[in-house]
Amino acid sequence: MTTIYTNGRFYTFDQNQPTVEAVVVRNGRIIDLGSHSDMLLQWGRADAAVKDLGGSMVTPGLIDSHLHLSSIATKMMTMDLGSITTKDQLLQAIKEKAEETPVNGWIQGRGWDENRFTEGGMPTIEELDRVAPHWPVILTRVCGHVDMVNSKALEIAGYSPEMEIPSGGTVVLDPQTKRPTGMLLETAAEIIERHIPEPTYRQYKDSLREAIRYAIRTGLTGVHTEDLRTFGGIDQTWQLYDELLNQEQERLRCNLLIYYPHIQRVRELGMYAGYGNETLQIGAVKVFADGSFGGRTALLSAPYTDDAGNVGSEIHDNDRLYEIFREARSANMPIAVHTIGDLALDNVLDTLDRFPAVALRDRMIHTSLLRPDQLARLKRPTMIADIQPRFVVGDFPWVADRIGQGRADQAYIWKTMLEAGIMCAGGSDAPVEPLEPLLGIHAAVTRRAPKDTHAGYNPGQNLTIEEALRIFTYGGALATNEETVKGTLSRGKFADMTVYSQDLMKVEADEILNTQIERTIIGGEVCYENGGNKNLVEI
């Protein structure tokens, strides 16, 4: 069947036809596009469905290049701590959760951020024990790199000073008593997580279905998601997505990053980067090189300004990085590396330079802090930077205290990166930051929180609305070498489109926040249609 989407203002991001009024779809792909009158004249037969968009703006389908759908799904099953702003609020929330939880049942939460606390500071392990003495507690910071636990959780884990902690992890000790403070950095949380009862397959599947539908409601037509650590490996992760996307037709296009310990199992299953179909594919090998600014674990070439002597955490030394990269390359797979600090990026690039490129692009995830000399090293046809514009909202202004104003001016320099010819793809890292791509686009354009009115943190790095939209569309296609089938509205490409309530190219930046997603169209089918008129809010 032929469908004509017409009476819209389509921004194609294809230089051959930058704007059109109508797009013609058949079998999930665009077969023609042009003026309203020409498309109706050529394709308006009796068997063609004509869908009037009422003058709405349309872009290629939005793509989130880096998030964790599994964590969004499991967050729906745990405490959401994103709105907590004081220590007392946090302790009260834990106390109330304990009152409704069976004794010895786990209390889990995610999203706390001490930089948002207006009073009280961080709770001590003794305070956590006081409000939940009979329940193991684990609360993950918004960044995902720091966890807060109580004594019951450490007891269940069998913690002792002699216990072997996973490489790259730290159990923070009180300098006087040498006892745990309750803070676990990076991989140290694994000593606790291995004791948490696994949700049932049905619970995982139901919550993942809701996360997928949520993503589609935000205007996303595709995501690149890292889930093997949450869903217990490639076998179950693939089964969950295959059932939901291919069998039950939930539609969202998903590219699965492969956490590096699972490379061998992927090969045993006969999978490889690009394995799958146009809806579900295997992606790059995911590796962590360092941590986060919030936890002072991002690896820097000079110490933190507010913590002399600390340069952050090296998750893997260079020898281990080499072995991981070698295993990935032996499987002919690209590599996607979490690099926030500048020294972490140096280590990764130095190690990558020892291997030939593969057919699909390597991905530098975050690339938060860049020295000028690193720009040229990132400009490669075989490499792309996965950037998260909302990090500016989450990290400023406190990041300047962490790393100093001089280095803060070299953080999240997306305008400089684009002007240097570095390929960039836009993402959210949800649930670290909100999933809604319009919030990420607003952050890319303004470099400030929605409630702020200043010109932006380092406003010379503000992107234009077109640049921001491109990194969330064409950039997402570049990240998986799919620019020939998605990322622009062009003949022969997937008919993936996002429809907006107003023309973002013609409004003030803050009007982005008052824009609705009217429709999400995937493969020519309307997968979401907004019947309401609610302004965009942070979730």
Image (spheres, rainbow, N blue to C red):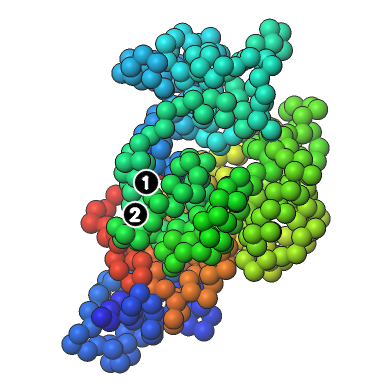
Q: Quadrant of residue 311?
A: top right
User: What residue is pinned by disc 2?
Assistant: 244
Position of 221 with respect to 292 (left or right) is: left
Mark 2 residue type: Leu
Would you say residue 514 is visible in this rendering?
no
- The front one of 458 and 258 is 258
In percent of width and height, residue 336 lies at 63, 53
Which residue is denoted by mark 1 in the rendering?
208
User: Disc 2 on helix, strand or loop?
Assistant: helix
Residue at figure coordinates x 53%, y 70% from the top left: 482
- Residue at 38% x, 84% y is 31
Tell me the residue at 43%/50% (across/down): 436
Above or below, 310 against 263 in this view is: above
Question: Mark 2 or mark 1: which comes first in sequence?
Answer: 1
Q: Quadrant of residue 30?
A: bottom left
Percent coordinates x, y for residue 161 in the rendering: 67, 15
Given residues 120 and 97, the one toward you in this image is 97
Quadrant where the C terminus is found in the figure: top left
**Crowding near the residue tagged with mark 2, few <14, some 14–19, many ≥20 C-alpha atoms within 10 Å:** some
Which amino acid, mark 1?
A: Leu
Establish if 9 lies above or below 383. Answer: below
5 left or right, relative to 282: left
